[in-house]
Image (cartoon, grey):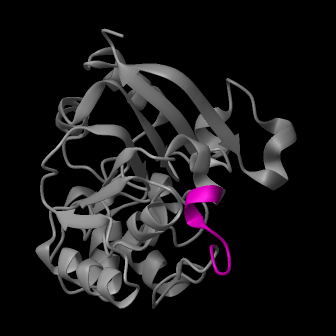
């Protein structure tokens, strides 16, 4: 992927953006519930009295909110012990007793919630298998993720301008990034959090080959471009994907 690479690509990127792109601070949920914005207001009914797993919980803000707003018990699951410790401290400060932060939940879930994750997993097929194994037979997954790869900002930090990650080569972009991040990443998959170049179509194919099935899937359009959003343009004009998955045997 990418047309402009080598020294030329690198120099163009350095000229356009000598520092991090603007608008990547993630403040769009200030004063709002991220869960409600991404999953819809029905999320609160879905988790009432339920055992819930927040898969990829990070520092725990959403897991704590789920616990405070009606879940029987929430397990915030993440692979980062550093983030889990931050989450535990936050839960203690808020006197939230019905949430546990761990690398593996000790019981099966009625509902698994996951936000902003499927475009980052190194092996999303394996993650789907893991999620399926964490569900009760009658349970389900509510997921939201994006921007997906063909979104104007699908390159995340590499989005020097809209669709820059599709115009410049991976090597040129990673060389440009080395001036603002010192982790030595030379591939999209190696950056902090990882980028697996997830598309809507790829996600649908992964589900077909998993132990899960799609009950519903919404491709939510980029608001200013919604009149141009359709099946043919959805890969380029979808803001987020919102879906509900169930075990394929149900």
Residues rendered magenta in the picture: 29-36
Q: Where is residue 140? Give x, y as percent.
A: 40, 30
Q: Is residue 34 magenta?
A: yes
Q: Where is residue 100? Give x, y as percent.
A: 23, 65
Q: Where is residue 58? Give x, y as percent.
A: 30, 69
Query: Quick one: quadrant of the N terminus?
Result: top left
**Apparent side of residue 131 relative to residue 152 in the rendered image (left or right):** left
At horizontal 33% and vertical 55% (from top left) the residue drawn is 73
The answer to whether residue 152 of the structure is visible from this angle is no
Q: Where is residue 24? Give x, y as percent.
A: 53, 78
Residue occupying the far top of the picture: 249
**Apparent side of residue 233 relative to residue 198 in the rendered image (left or right):** right
**Toward which corner of the image does residue 54 lie, by quadrant?**
bottom left
**Apparent side of residue 62 relative to residue 78 in the rendered image (left or right):** right
Between 189 and 90, the one nearer to me in the picture: 90
Q: Is residue 165 above or below residue 95?
A: above
Residue occupying the far right of the picture: 227
Between 2 and 102, the one nearer to me in the picture: 102
At horizontal 30% and vertical 88% (from top left) the residue drawn is 179
The answer to whether residue 29 of the structure is visible from this angle is yes
At horizontal 12% and vertical 49% (from top left) the residue drawn is 106
Query: Quick one: quadrant of the C terminus?
Result: top left
At horizontal 35% and vertical 15% (from top left) the residue drawn is 208
Between 220 and 61, the one nearer to me in the picture: 61
| Magenta-colored segment: predominant secondary structure | loop
């Amino acid at each position: 992927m990418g047309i402009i690479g080598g020294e030329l690509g690198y120099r163009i990127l350095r000229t356009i953006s000598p520092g991090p792109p603007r608008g990547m601070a993630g403040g769009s949920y200030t004063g709002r519930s991220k869960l409600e914005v991404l999953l819809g207001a029905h999320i609160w009914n879905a988790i009432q009295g339920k055992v819930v797993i927040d898969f990829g919980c990070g520092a725990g803000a959403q897991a704590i909110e789920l616990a405070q707003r009606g879940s029987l018990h929430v397990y915030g699951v993440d692979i980062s012990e550093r983030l889990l410790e931050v989450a535990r401290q936050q839960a203690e400060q808020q006197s939230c007793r019905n949430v546990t932060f761990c690398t593996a939940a000790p019981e099966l879930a009625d509902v698994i919630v996951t936000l902003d994750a499927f475009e980052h997993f190194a092996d999303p097929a394996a993650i789907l298998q893991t999620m399926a194994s964490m569900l009760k037979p009658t349970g389900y997954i509510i997921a939201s993720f994006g921007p997906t790869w063909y979104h104007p900002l699908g390159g995340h930090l590499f989005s020097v301008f809209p669709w820059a990650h599709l115009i410049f080569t991976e090597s040129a972009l990673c060389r440009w990034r080395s001036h603002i991040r010192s982790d030595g990443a030379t591939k999209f998959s190696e950056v902090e959090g990882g980028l697996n170049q997830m598309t809507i179509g790829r996600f649908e194919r992964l589900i077909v080959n998993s132990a899960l099935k799609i009950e519903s899937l919404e491709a939510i359009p980029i608001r200013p471009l919604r009149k141009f959003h359709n099946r043919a343009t959805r890969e380029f004009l979808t803001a987020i994907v919102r879906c509900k998955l169930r075990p394929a045997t149900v």
